[in-house]
Amino acid sequence: MTDAPPPKRKKRPTTPKLLTGSEPPQRKKLSRVDYEEELRLLQVELVKLQRWVVEKGLRIAVVFEGRDAAGKGGSIKRIADRLNPRVCRIVALGTPTERQKTQWYFQRYVSELPAAGEMVLFDRSWYNRAGVERVMGFCSNEQYEEFLRSCPQFERMIVRDGLILIKYWFSVSDVEQERRFQARMTDSVKRWKLSPMDLESRAHWVEYSRAKDVMLENTDIPEAHWYVVRADDKRRARLNCIKHLLSQIPYEELPPRVIELPPRQPDRGYVRPPMSTNRFVPEVY
């Protein structure tokens, strides 16, 4: 007589492991068809918002911050893609000049703020001082401390003057950031995105995390809250960001303008020069 096999133990239900930054487990990837269909609907709403901004003379500034390769640029591009560049303007300032370094810190950003009927999307902003400048030692401790004191006052001042200020932080896990960095290294059309500063930031992950936490703690004010976008899934991040942006600015759909094409100018005998005088682009395709 053989011994009966031991009874099988019931498996305990397991809790999905969270990603870095206490992010929820990844969901099924959003299909390109579903993504583009939803993006199209949101971009239609952005066009309606654009007309409202112009008609009402609104001034809107949207700040995009986050880690390198978090997807800020992609979201900015999708927001501005169908809008009039004279209304929706992207600002991505480079390294300050020697002259600008002697100015009031906020001075070069103030000149980029929107006028009536404009929306400005800041691809990084005055928060450089609380992030890369702090971590990489590009500013002194005194300059950093002064920024944390003066930034809330600066933002309250411009909001009190009527400007609508919205701030987004794009959060990406270290695993996903590493994957995107590796993809950029092998893709010839993305290699330009890997700046020396991006590569250097890899060695300062914890310091950037600490700087970000201090920044949000000191500059999340009632007049201009920080909104965190979970960005490990680029498609969902873009849609969620645009959806939220639309919810932050009350607008209405204005009746469409009546457009009538004027008649074409009649030909009064003007003789155009022969086509052989033009230099045409070679028709390779």
Image (cartoon, helix red, strand yellow):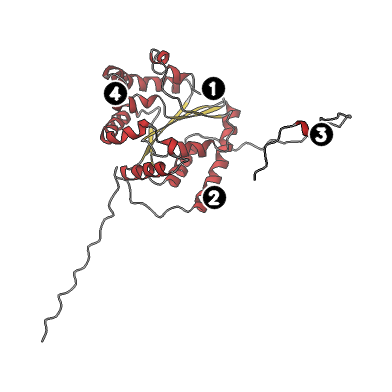
First of labels 2, 4 by sequence position: 2
At 57% from the left and 35% from the top, the residue drawn is 83
In this view, the mark in front (2 or 4): 4
In this view, the mark in front (1 or 2): 2
At 34% from the left and 19% from the top, the residue drawn is 150
Q: Which one is in front, 280 or 47?
A: 280
Residue 13 percent location from the top left of the image: 25, 61
Distance CA(mark 3)–CA(mark 1): 36 Å
Label 3: element kind: loop
| Quarter of the view holding residue 16 | bottom left
Numbered-mark total: 4
Vertically, is 251 above or below 146? below
Query: What's the residue type where badge 4 is placed?
Result: Gly
First of labels 3, 1 by sequence position: 1
Query: What's the residue type where badge 1 is placed?
Result: Ala
First of labels 3, 2 by sequence position: 2
At 34% from the left and 24% from the top, the residue drawn is 129
First of labels 4, 1 by sequence position: 1
Q: Quadrant of the C terminus?
A: top right
Query: What's the residue type where badge 2 is placed?
Result: Glu
Residue 263 percent location from the top left of the image: 82, 34
Distance CA(mark 2)–CA(mark 4): 44 Å
Residue 261 percent location from the top left of the image: 77, 35
Residue 37 circle label: 2
Distance CA(mark 4)–CA(mark 1): 34 Å
Query: What's the residue type where badge 3 is placed?
Result: Arg
Q: What residue would you read off at disc 1?
A: 115
Distance CA(mark 3)–CA(mark 2): 37 Å
Q: Quadrant of the N terminus?
A: bottom left
